[in-house]
Amino acid sequence: MTELLQRLSVAFGAPDTPDLGKWTAEISRMLMRYTADVKDKAFDIIVTGHRSRTFPSIAVIISACEDAAHIIAPSRPPEQFLKRNLDWTEAAITRADMLIQSQLGQRAADDGWVLSLWDFCRKHGRLPTGREVGECISNARGFDEAYAQVCRQGTPLDRTLEQLGASMLAKRREKAELAHGNPITPRPTRKDMAAGETPGETP
């Protein structure tokens, strides 16, 4: 099972298929043409846009990979590309960071659903209201339940999923600190380290 499928299993549970082996082999073959960066971005697209708590279909996964590929190396005309991906621009991400630094953001940070709130703000450019708040909470609780179930298992695959889930919890803690006005300096990425740079430093 590819890393993308493993990460999706943490968020949505196992795929609903009568033959998991054949299903996994088929989608793994289709995912081979995408780079690791594309599949990593596809995961973000799926977990923030997939409204169902069931495992996403092959069509949804491939569509997310195609969108991710255009985000990383767009081949569409700029105006068409931006209309489809406005929620992943630097401005959208910055606005989401600002929106969670609010009373609702602090409540979400204290209650454990701030990452779900941040994803909503990034996508919609505003704080949720009414039933939307409940949906953010429900999405976060669904992840918590799936992660807890994985942690109770003991197979090598489950341990891998546990590590992936832990990385999402680390991001949640980062946004919780930000909501309370205490931003965490991000860890250097592989690209930063290859370039000999540390985030926050100037040349």
Image (spheres, rainbow, N blue to C red):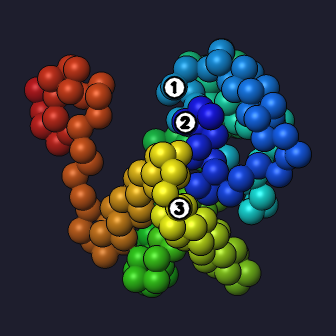
Q: Give the mark nearest the N terminus, 1 or 3.
A: 1
Residue shown at the point (52%, 40%) measured from the top left: 89
**Residue 107 figure quarter:** bottom left
Residue 151: x and y, percent? 48, 64
Identity, as a three-letter code, of the amino acid under mark 2: Glu
Q: Which mark is residue 3?
A: 2
Real-space Cα separation, disc 1 to disc 2, in angstroms: 9 Å
Which quadrant is the N terminus positioned in?
top right
Count residues near mark 3 (Cα–Cα under 10 Å), then give few for <14, some for 14-19, many for 20+.
few
Callout 1 crowding tier (Cα within 10 Å): few <14, some 14–19, many ≥20 = few
Residue 82 or 116: which is nearer the viewer?
116
Which residue is labeled 3 in the image? 153
Element type where label 3 sits in the image = loop
Q: Label 3 sits on what residue type?
A: Gln
**Going by the image, does 166 lie left or right of 75?**
left
Please name which of the two marks, 2 or 3, marks the residue nearer to the observer. 3
The C terminus appears in which quarter of the rendering? Answer: top left
Report the front residue among 157 and 196: 157
Evaluate if marks 1 and 2 touch, with contact meaning CB atoms under 8 Å apart.
yes
Using the rendered image of the protein, determine whether residue 71 is visible from the camera's viewpoint: no
Residue receiving disc 1: 36
Q: How many marks?
A: 3
Vertical side of 86 occupied by 30: above or below: above
Of label 1 and label 2, which has the lower sequence position? 2
User: Which residue is rendered at x = 21% and y = 20% of the image?
Assistant: 195
From where the camera sits, is residue 101 visible? yes
Whichever of labels 2 and 3 marks the residue nearer the N terminus, that label is: 2
Where is residue 4 shown, x and y percent of the image?
A: 59, 37
Q: CA distance from mark 2 to mark 3?
A: 18 Å
Query: How far apart, in angstroms, are the residues tagged by discs 1 and 3?
Result: 27 Å
Q: Secondary structure at mark 1?
A: helix
Q: Amino acid at mark 1?
A: Ala
